Image (tube, rainbow, N blue to C red):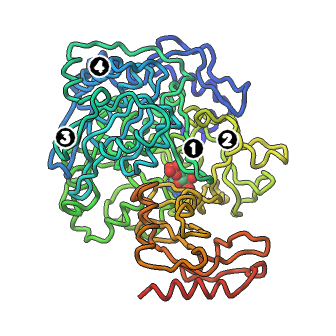
Amino acid sequence: MKLTYEEVYRRSIADPEGFWGEEAERLHWFRKPEQILDASQAPFFRWFPGGETNLCYNAVDRHVLGGRGDKPAILWESPEAGRSAVLTFREVLREVNHFAAVLQNLGVRKGDRVLVYMPMVPEALIAVLACVRIGAVHSVVFAGFSGEALAHRIEDSGARVVVTADAGLRKGKPVELKKIADRAVELASTRVEHVVVLDRGISPWAAVPGRDVRWDEAMAAAKDAEVPAVPVESTEPSYILYTSGTTGKPKGVVRDTGGYMVALHTSLRLIYGCGPEDVFWSTSDIGWVVGHSYIIYGPLLYGIPTVVYEGTPDSPHPGIWWEVAAKHGVTVLFSAPTAMRMLRKYPPSWVERYDLAKLRHVFLAGEPLDEPTYQWAVETLKKPVVDHYWQTESGWPMITNHMGLPPLPFKPGSPTKAAIGWRLEVVDEKGDPRPAGERGYLVAHPPLPPGALQTLWRDDERYVASYWNYFAKYGKRLYFSGDYAIRDEDGYFRLLGRADEVINVAGHRMGTREVEEVVSAHPAVAEVSAIGVEDEIKGEAIAVFVVLKKGVEETEKLHGEIVGLIRENIGPIATPKVLRVVPRLPKTRSGKVMRRVLKALCEGKAMGDLSTIEDGASVDEVRAALEELAH
Ligand code: AMP
C-alpha cells in the first residue's frame, strides 16, 4: 500500500537524514557521502559532504550504461525554426563528450565558470551537461536579457568562456545573440577568453580572431574525444543562476551538486508522480530555474525524455502546444499561469482536436494561479491541474500536492501543503506563528532540504542578510521566502504576493530597484519609482513614474529614451506597460515614496489610509497624468 502524504512528509521532517540518505542511494556516487547533512555552519547547509558524484554521469551515462541508450532523451520542437529533432541518451552522451572536450581544449577546468547564453536548442542542454561533466560551473542567462545584463553576469561570475548562438528566434524575428554577447564581452571589466558560437544560419556574424570558436568546427575536431565524467564533491557548486532581489544588483544563487541531484530525482517520483515511461515537458526556458530543474536535470536524472521547445504558446497556431504534447505523448506538462491566461483567449476546440489521452497532470508555477484560469485549465484540459509554489532559491517545489503519493483534495487558489523536506510556517514580524487563516510571512525552518540554495555567489554575507536576518533580532533564524501567505485550518497555504520589492511579470522575477536604477541614469530624470501593477495576461506588469529635472520638457523622444534604457540594460521583458511623467511622487512625510498609492491609482482601486502623505495634491497629479495619456 502506498504511504500517505502525511506519513512521508512527517518522516522527511522528523528524520531528514534517514529520509534523504535513502533517497541518495537511488543515484550513482563515485564516493559515498561520509555524512548526510552537516548543519554545523548554519545557515549554510551542506548535504552529503564527503560524497563525490557527477550530475552529467547520473543524467546521461548512467542510463546508457543501464541499457537505455536508445531511449529518447531530448525531444526538440522548434515551430520557430520549422524543425524538430530527437536525441537518444546515447546521442546526448556522444555530444556531451565532444563538447566537454571542446571546453577542455579552451582551457576550462573544474571550478571555472562558463556562461551559457543560448536559445532553446538541444545544444544548450549539451553545453550545460558538458560543463558539469568536467566540474565547471555554468551560469545560464536567459536569452532575452540585454548586453548590459549579460556583462554584469559575466563580471560577477568571472566566466572565462561564453557559449552562444548566432541568433534565437522570437515570433519569426531573429534575436541576434552573438552580437549582444560581443557587446557584453566588450563591456565587462573581466576578461572572457573565448566565445563559442553555434551557427544556426539565421543571422550573419563576424568572428573575433583568436577569441571566437565555431561550435561545429570545434565539435568536429573533438569527434574522437572521450571525456570521463569527473567526480565532483557533493557540496561543490554546479551552477550560478542570477535572480532579482530588492537591490539593483541581481543575486547569484549558488546550487550545489549532490543535494540538488537527489532532491530533483525525488521530486520527479513523489511530486510529479513519474515512472520510467513518462515524457516530461516543461514549457519554461533554460534561462530560468524551472528550465534548469525540469527541462534539463530533473527528467534526465530520472531517465525520461524531456521536450525542449523553441517558440511561443500560440504560434503558428493556438493549438501548437497540444499538438506537440500529442505528438510526443507528453504525460506531465509543466507551465505557468501566464501561458494559460494567454491560451484561454482561444476557443477550447484548439485543445479538443488533439489526442491528449496520455497527459496525466498539468503543473503550474511561477506566479499566483487565479481561480478563473485554474477552472478554465481543469475544464478544458480535463486533467488534474496542480498549482505548486517555489522559487529560484528553493530549486524545486516548496508547496505542492504530491502526485506520486495519494493526492490530497485540491482547493482552488491553494498550491496545497508543504513539500517533503520543507518545514514551512506563516509568521508575524517577530517570527512567531500566525493563527490559521491569518496573513503573515512565509518562512522555512532550518535546515533547508537538499537542493535549496547554498549561498549567493561570493557573497555569503548577502545570503545571510537576504534570507536569514529578518527575524534575527527576535532570536529566530528563519529562511524568509519574500512572500506573504496564509495557512488555513487544514494546513493548506495560499500565497498573497511578494512582501518585498520584487515584481513578477509573466512568471519572471524583477526587482523594482533594478528598473529604478536604470531609469535614474537618464540625465533628464530627477526621481523615479517603479511598481508592479495588475495585468490581465502577465499577472503583473511594470509601471514607471518619473519626475524630470527642472526645465526639462516631456517629449515623445524622452519617453522613447527611457524605455530604450530599460530594454538595453535589462532586456525587453522589462519594458514598462505604463510610463508617466509626474510633477512629483506621492510621499510620506518622512520622504518615502508611497508605492501602494501609485499602484492603487494605476489599478483604479481604493487608496487606503492617506494620513501619512506629505501633500495630497500629488495624488491628483498622478491621477491626471494617468488619465491624460490614457486616450
Ligand atoms: P522565481 O524565483 O523567479 O521563480 O520567482 C519566485 C516567486 O514567484 C515566488 O517567491 C512567488 O512570489 C512567486 N510564485 C512562484 N510560484 C507561485 C505559485 N504557485 N503561487 C504564487 N506565487 C508563486
Task: Give the SS element for disc 3.
Answer: loop
Mark in front: 3 vs 4: 3
Quarter where residue 121 is shown: top left
- Disc 1 and disc 4: Cα gap in Å? 31 Å
Three-letter amino acid code of the residue under disc 2? Arg
Q: Distance between the residues labelled 3 and 4?
A: 21 Å
Q: Is the C-beta separation of discs 3 and 1 under 8 Å?
A: no
| For residue 490, side relative to residue 284 (left or right) | right
Q: Distance between the residues labelled 3 and 2?
A: 40 Å
Q: Is residue 415 in sight in this rendering?
A: no
On the image, numbered disc 1 is attached to which residue?
A: 251
Measured as percent of width and height from the top left, residue 257 is found at 51, 26
Mark 2: secondary structure: helix
The location of residue 356, given as percent across then percent down, is 24, 53
Tag 4's secondary structure?
helix
Q: Kindly identify the residue that appears in the image at 51 percent across and 83 percent down.
A: 626
- Closer to the observer: label 1 or label 4? 1
As measured in the structure, the alpha-carbon distance from the residue carrying label 4 to the one carrying label 2 is: 37 Å
Contact between labelled residues 1 and 2, with CB atoms less than 8 Å apart: yes
Q: Residues within 10 Å of mark 4 (few under 14, many from 20)?
A: many
| Residue type beneath disc 1 | Lys
Q: Which residue lies furthest to the front in this view?
A: 551
Query: Which corner quadrant of the image does residue 517 belong to?
Result: bottom right
What residue would you read off at disc 2? 462
* Image location (x, y in percent) of residue 614: 76, 80
Disc number for residue 97: 4
Pointer 3: what residue? Answer: 200
Helix, strand or loop at label 1? It is: strand
Amino acid type of the residue that numbered disc 4 sits on in the rendered structure: Asn
